[in-house]
Amino acid sequence: MPKDSLRALYVNELKDLYNAETQLVKALPKMAKGSSNAELRQGFEEHLRQTSEQVSRLEQIFEMLGEKPAGNKCVGMEGIVKQGAETLAEDYEGAVMDAAIIGAAQRVEHYEIAGYGTVKAFAELLGENEHVSLLEQTLEEEKQTDEKLTRLAEQINSQAGQGEQEETKPRSNRAA
């Protein structure tokens, strides 16, 4: 593959990620608002701040490349965000809603991990060492966010399941 073609693909993928991140800047406050668990809500608020920094890192890379960040619509993230919005519109409550939101958020994180892993590999091949360090920083943040969501899911999913068990117990066995 000629280096020019890889560079064009690299820039195209960066534009896709840039659009994905800007979509998330709009979606994360809705996820935070829909969360009943305080730690989950705080996690979304923190990730919103992180996402803004990630957008800035991408803008730095575009500036180094002499490129404009706009131009691509990330239809993959658009679909994931739309699915998350549909989840928020469901009439789940409490821990069950939080469990659903975590599932939606982890889809986002896995999509981003795949995207940043790809562009980091392209940057390495292209010898863009400054880009590599910026992309690695974002990739690590996405992995950490996914790990936090997994830890929260272990607790929240258990709470959601306990609510189900309570609902299926006969009335005489329920605690007063």
Image (tube, rainbow, N blue to C red):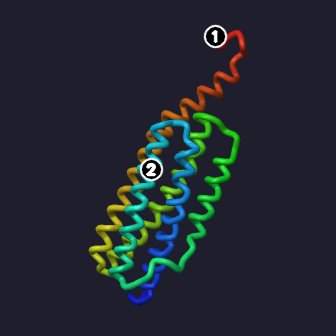
Residue at horizontal 44 percent and vertical 45 percent from the top: 43
Three-letter residue code for mark 1: Ala
For numbered disc 1, what is the local secondary structure? Answer: loop
Q: Which comes sooner in the sequence, label 1 or label 2?
A: 2
Residue 63 location in percent, x, y?
35, 80
For numbered disc 2, what is the local secondary structure? Answer: helix
**Observer-nearest of 21 and 102:** 21
Position above or below: 24 against 106:
below
Position above or below: 115 against 155:
below
Q: Quadrant of residue 4?
A: bottom left
Q: Residues within 10 Å of mark 1 (few under 14, many from 20)?
A: few
Please tell me the numbered disc located at residue 146: 2
Three-letter residue code for mark 2: Asp
Please tell me the numbered disc located at residue 176: 1
Quadrant position of the C terminus in the picture: top right
Position above or below: 142 against 90:
below
- For the residues labelled 1 and 2, the Cα–Cα distance comes to 38 Å
Q: Residues within 10 Å of mark 2 (few under 14, many from 20)?
A: many
Quadrant position of the N terminus in the picture: bottom left
Q: In this view, does 42 lie to the left or right of 125?
A: right
**Observer-nearest of 47 and 7:** 47
Whether pointer 1 and pointer 2 mark residues with C-beta atoms closer than 8 Å, the reply is: no
